[in-house]
Amino acid sequence: MAMNYNAKDEVDGGPPCAPGGTAKTRRPDNTAFKQQRLPAWQPILTAGTVLPIFFIIGLIFIPIGIGIFVTSNNIREIEGNVFMYYGLSNFYQNHRRYVKSRDDSQLNGDSSALLNPSKECEPYRRNEDKPIAPCGAIANSMFNDTLELFLIGNDSYPIPIALKKKGIAWWTDKNVKFRNPPGGDNLEERFKGTTKPVNWLKPVYMLDSDPDNNGFINEDFIVWMRTAALPTFRKLYRLIERKNDLHPTLPAGRYSLNVTYNYPVHYFDGRKRMILSTISWMGGKNPFLGIAYIAVGSISFLLGVVLLVINHKYRNSSNTADITI
Amino acid sequence: MEREPAGTEEPRPPGRRRRREGRTRTVRSNLLPPPGAEDPAAGAAKGERRRRRGCAQHLADNRLKTTKYTLLSFLPKNLFEQFHRPANVYFVFIALLNFVPAVNAFQPGLALAPVLFILAITAFRDLWEDYSRHRSDHKINHLGCLVFSREEKKYVNRFWKEIHVGDFVRLRCNEIFPADILLLSSSDPDGLCHIETANLDGETNLKRRQVVRGFSELVSEFNPLTFTSVIECEKPNNDLSRFRGCIIHDNGKKAGLYKENLLLRGCTLRNTDAVVGIVIYAGHETKALLNNSGPRYKRSKLERQMNCDVLWCVLLLVCMSLFSAVGHGLWIWRYQEKKSLFYVPKSDGSSLSPVTAAVYSFLTMIIVLQVLIPISLYVSIEIVKACQVYFINQDMQLYDEETDSQLQCRALNITEDLGQIQYIFSDKTGTLTENKMVFRRCTVSGVEYSHDANAQRLARYQEADSEEEEVVPRGGSVSQRGSIGSHQSVRVVHRTQSTKSHRRTGSRAEAKRASMLSKHTAFSSPMEKDITPDPKLLEKVSECDKSLAVARHQEHLLAHLSPELSDVFDFFIALTICNTVVVTSPDQPRTKVRVRFELKSPVKTIEDFLRRFTPSCLTSGCSSIGSLAANKSSHKLGSSFPSTPSSDGMLLRLEERLGQPTSAIASNSYSSQADNWASELAQEQESERELRYEAESPDEAALVYAARAYNCVLVERLHDQVSVELPHLGRLTFELLHTLGFDSVRKRMSVVIRHPLTDEINVYTKGADSVVMDLLQPCSSVDARGRHQKKIRSKTQNYLNLYAAEGLRTLCIAKRVLSKEEYACWLQSHLEAESSLENSEELLFQSAIRLETNLHLLGATGIEDRLQDGVPETISKLRQAGLQIWVLTGDKQETAVNIAYACKLLDHDEEVITLNATSQEACAALLDQCLRYVQSRGLQRAPEKTKGKVSMRFSSLCPPSASTASGRRPSLVIDGRSLAYALEKNLEDKFLFLAKQCRSVLCCRSTPLQKSMVVKLVRSKLKAMTLAIGDGANDVSMIQVADVGVGISGQEGMQAVMASDFAVPKFRYLERLLILHGHWCYSRLANMVLYFFYKNTMFVGLLFWFQFFCGFSASAMIDQWYLIFFNLLFSSLPPLVTGVLDRDVPANVLLTNPQLYKSGQNMEEYRPRTFWFNMADATFQSLVCFSIPYLAYYDSNVDLFTWGTPIVTIALLTFLLHLGIETKTWTWLNWITCGFSVLLFFTVALIYNASCATCYPPSNPYWTMQALLGDPVFYLTCLMTPVAALLPRLFFRSLQGSVFPTQLQLARQLTRKSPRRCSAPKETFAQGRLPKDSGTEHSSGRTVKTSVPLSQPSWHTQQPVCSLEASGEPSTVDMSMPLREHTLLEGLSALSPMSSAPGEAVLRSPGGCPEESKVRAASTGRVTPLSSLFSLPTFSLLNWISSWSLVSRLGSVLQFSRTEQLADGQAGRGVPVQPHSGRSGLQGPDHRLLIGASSRRSQ
């Protein structure tokens, strides 16, 4: 019996004297995988083979782009439900420390977190020894202007447009993520022992009269808490619901916007806007996507043409192309 | 458990001495009662145990423990080891940084996850390895062994691990030694035993070990209880070939111990019934284990390059972090005073200073962007390399059936280096050749016996190989074929009928298998064993045998023979006994019952000599020997004669023999022939008994087998006698008086024997021709005998030159008859030399020289060391692959040069610069001269080169150096002495420069140290990737020095393999290993590394661009989970699969177009340029992948993480599509892993986003993905962005594929086309190209020649010279003849009208025409005359050769074939010797002139 003497030697080969008893050879298995002969598709990238891809991309993208572009431009007509946004510019809701400055447990109605908010909320965690509800910088900086829209009729009597406050937040936010703290019927009772954020005028339980839109589940609040991705952003403010099919939601005419100005932005060179928009199947108005599609499609098509020329020019040589030393 | 210090218990004077000296170890029997023990009987067991413990305190026991960890130590030790890797430290540092609240980016626990994951994988792997080591240790520790037990007073079975130093161990035949044991007793009557060291060094020949002096004389069985001596020996060391010590007996006598007394752990006892010994070193102190070093870890070139690029990435990371830190500082400075609503002050309400904020931001950025340093890269590379090693090991075509071994990757992490090799340094013997020494031909007494039948037999092996095995032995066909060798074919017929073994007929593979059955006998494949005798010589042998048998009891026996017959007889006796071959018959180990002669030899004293050599003793001894031998042999013959069935078979055979035509042996009368056969049959029966010859070198075995073929059979060798069996004389027992072993200085060996027939004292010497020829007895030219001798000598010398020219290894056999007085005189001095303590070696050397003079030349042998299969093809392929091949051999120049021609290392139509210098100055001058010469050629070619650049396409395809290489670069041959000078500091640059200019370099007579120096020089000075391949211990240093060391697991043992990174069974596997696997490994790994860099840069780019929109606050729009697990989970598998399985060019294309290998040499796949191009593309892609979602979601109500998730998705899709562009072969595994990655991402995202409504602050991704999946913009962005990002790359790739494709792309395109289509345009292309470019560039011209060998037939027609080997013809005469013939032919071609047609073609071609076309024309014209020339008398040829060898001995000769050199005034030095220039078609006459000149000079 031979022993593999080199115990340290991990190579399975070892000395050539195989154990006497084993008649088995070391011949490797002849399988496609082990012999690296797996059937395979072997695309070769040359002008000739790739140019269909470019044309196909062009042919698909350009119509899509046109479709998107048209849809996006059609949004102008104020039909169907109209969405009222407020827009802010140069407002860094995505700043790292700002984004972190919240307590999701507190917002979810956790009573211990209500009275003892997360450290992430510092320095907007406590005020005068009372926990702030809702805590954190995001909540503290909530947009609190009031916008009202009036249709100025012929008789110069402004008719207020009905602005729907509910239905502007994600359903899951309103029903799952955000919850008022448990307790009695009285919302003020439930928020007992807490104080309002420093910048706020009113405490959280006085955001709205509707109990279903008050406290943490106030939709304006929920919308604000979804921090914007970019420093220029808009947030849904109100919904203008269509009354019936016969009349447009916002008939043509003069409108006036009444802004209750609470929210200072000029300190940091910010801007405020109000946007009215309808929504198509692909969201709000954004011409970019359509243009981008058209552009990419066209470039692709163009490159395809270039490749076609190249292919034509070099076909002969590529046919005879050969490996040489 | 009490533990008493051993020292106080046992007063041990030697022990103290050991401590004092610190260099020796003292071993005593464990069976001895400890001195001072009160009651030996009662305290025996206790005492023994105690002693054991005492021993264990300072001496290792025999337990093998190779594991690194224990259960407790595993975690800390493993972590400690893992943190030796800087990357791990870096990642842990970053993960820990996360625990600092001010700068943390992720949840601290989460950030640790990937690092822990990586560490865990590595730890698990280490654990598993350690466990397998533990298992194998356990197995070895529990092997059983007989150990003498004190209690039971007999040998009992114990485990290996229970053996201690000082124990007595008894081993039986075929058992393995458990420790290093001092041999005290052997069942062999002479106190010998044989061991096989295959486990240790792989050498399968038996080695002899001897019982310690003083114990061998013991008559009775050795009793351990009576052993009271003390052994002093060296401290444990790892020198296998050295052991020194002494044994001190009770009576104070000392005896020396040598390595012949030591049995090493791991060796196997063979041929000996049983041995007993005492354990000297145990366990880890044994020499075997001290020699054992684990697998090697080298860092590959690619990895070095990658590490450099990782540093670039670190720099980039720091730059990005700094940039964003500065940005953040500015941002803070701008906004914090402005009461910005979004500004978050410090937790205590105070505002942050911009500088502090910048510092924090810097650190956070480093955490966020850490992905740039690919944590998964190292793990992935390890995985990919492991898979590559697996695939290489599994390659069926690297499996060698003969040896049942496949390629072994011993170094696990340099697979990709195989794809970048530039220089190959190869050993010759055993690497290019088989190291199977085959007796090929011989000359005796001036008569040449060409052994044609033997040549045919060898040819048949070759054929059988090429034809692949046939199961049915082709006896019939062989007999038909045998035209001259009817005798031999008779043998074949009856053999195949009577025995099952495929001795002469089977293919080499079959033969190998047969020899494997009787394994453990080195150098004994049937090819080596079964020599077909030359009929003429056989006749002479039997004639003289017979006449000796008739006259055996007469005086002056040899006088009855003619001088020639007497020479023949002595020649074969010398072949048989002048060696150290051990005869074994493994089935029955030698028994103790054996007739012993009272005369013990070697002669030890003068008295001994006088006693033994008195005439009375001589006669009586002789007669007794003779009669005994005769008795014995007759007895043996009788007993070994077969029983009925086989004797029937014998009759049958006899009939067949008689039926055979006997025309070939016409001179013999019928009756004598029959007589001859009868004895031959008996002889065969005898040899059927399967004697095995265990030789130390293959040459020796070859000669003994050759003698056996002439019925001169070595049957027994003891240390004092050799027995030879002859058909008529029976067994002759020669008394062996001395053996003067072979050494490399003397280059010869001798035996001194007493001839049983004549009672003369004869010296038989066997050695290198150069040495032996000078030691011959000077013969006077006066008397006829002397003249005759002189003639014989010159004839023999001619034949020797011829043999050397054929590439045979030559040995001269000589004899000297000593008178008793001469012998007595010599013996006196020899014994003095032996007994002298100082410089005894020198004295022995002198003594040997005194003996080996005045020799009488008997003859010479030519042994062929056959080229391995496919060596010429492999070399030409490797050369096409742009590899420079240097051969470094210890062999002599002539043999090496001829082998080099045979294996196409040197070409006939190229110039050979031979550098033989005898002094430093001469060497310097020669080097200068060569350099000037080479440069002048270079100047000639310079305009060609620049012109060549005009055709862009082709110069881009081949590097300029290679283009000149493929042209007409000379080759360099240098001998060891000159090499020593050339490697001196002041000359090495010149030498290297010259060598660089040469196509191939051949270093002869080089020592192992020189070999490694050459490799080191090339490696360090040329910064080239080197590969060294060798098979023997002399190649080890070279293998270790080279970047990649390859060992051949051949016959020479395992030392080379042990030192190597890769072990291949044959040289030819190198082609597949390098050209296929090397290329694949390199391209796969290079592409994967590039891809990882791309991937990480692109991903980090996304985060970086976002910093411009979040006030450089190190905020991330991507959820931390995605950030951390993206690399590890979602995007890891597809690149791995591509890295393991991708085949950029199919195997067959790579193998048929070796030049594709150059892409690896030039680092085409991964070089700084590609790296930065890759990074730029990554930047662009990240910009696209960031800006499209940015613009699409600009001024929308999207929130941070709902915006980030599409970006991750886009990134993932882009990665996969990018990989798709880079993947060359799509197997189902690629598709599945890509699909799996996408699926996994969405599944994980959906589950994660649905799992918890309040978790994972700050992103709190609840329902994000679900919401996105309902948003058409998400899909639209995800569709367009990857396409937009990858358009440029795809466009560029396809443009490149069409307009300026690389070699690899061309090759890939080639596979698409059918073979017919791809070869056809090639021809047209070649023809179209040639007239245009032929004047300008060689490489394009060469294309024609070398790009064709896709198909074998075309190869044949284009390269007629090599077709001889390619078609499997015997590589002997035919192989070497062409190259001599060639010159002859070229000489003729200029004169004779025979080759007028090609000659005219040559002359017609335009002035600047490349030699290529000429060569082609010449070679095609040469095909026919070649065969006809074979029949030409080679007389002139011989003259020429002999003069050449004389010229080459003149010393410093610069050998040029160019006439200009002579005209240059260098005529004194430059002597043309290799007139193989391609221009010789025109210069033929000159050559002839020069040859004439040189031969004149020599006379």
Image (tube, coloured by chain):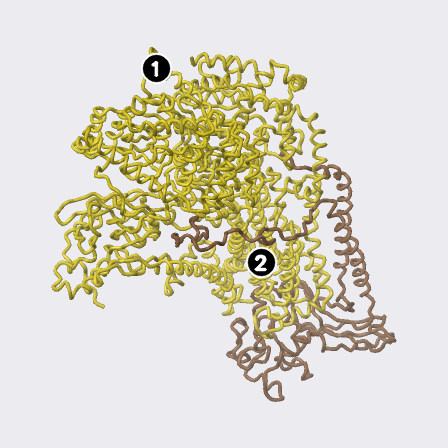
How many C-alpha atoms fall within 10 Å of the one at disc 2: few (<14), some, or many (≥20)?
some
* In this view, B92 is above or below B1376: below
Going by the numbered disc 2, the residue's amino acid type is Ser
Furthest-front residue in view? B671
Identify the secondary structure beneath mark 1: helix
Furthest-bottom residue in view? A184
Q: Which chain is yellow?
A: B
Counting from the top left corner in percent of width and height, residue B501 is at: 48, 44
- Quadrant location of residue B225? bottom left
* In this view, B103 is above or below B1443: below
Q: Mark 2 points at which residue?
A: B1132
Q: Which chain carries label 2?
A: B
Q: The brown chain is which one?
A: A
- Quadrant location of residue B1329? top right
Do the CB atoms of the residues marked 2 and 1 lie less than 8 Å apart?
Answer: no
* In this view, B948 is above or below B286: above
Counting from the top left corner in percent of width and height, residue B699 is at: 40, 34
* Residue A269 visible in rendering: no
Identify the secondary structure beneath mark 2: loop
Going by the numbered disc 1, the residue's amino acid type is Gly
How many C-alpha atoms fall within 10 Å of the one at disc 1: few (<14), some, or many (≥20)?
some
Task: State left or right for residue B667 relative to residue A208.
Answer: left
Q: Which chain carries label 1?
A: B
Which badge, 2 or 1, is on the more N-terminal residue? 1
Task: State left or right for residue B1446 relative to residue B279.
Answer: right
Disc 2 from disc 1: Cα separation: 86 Å
Camera-side residue: B81 or B750? B750
Residue B786 badge: 1
* Residue B1387 visible in rendering: yes
Residue B48 badge: none
Camera-side residue: B1307 or B444? B444
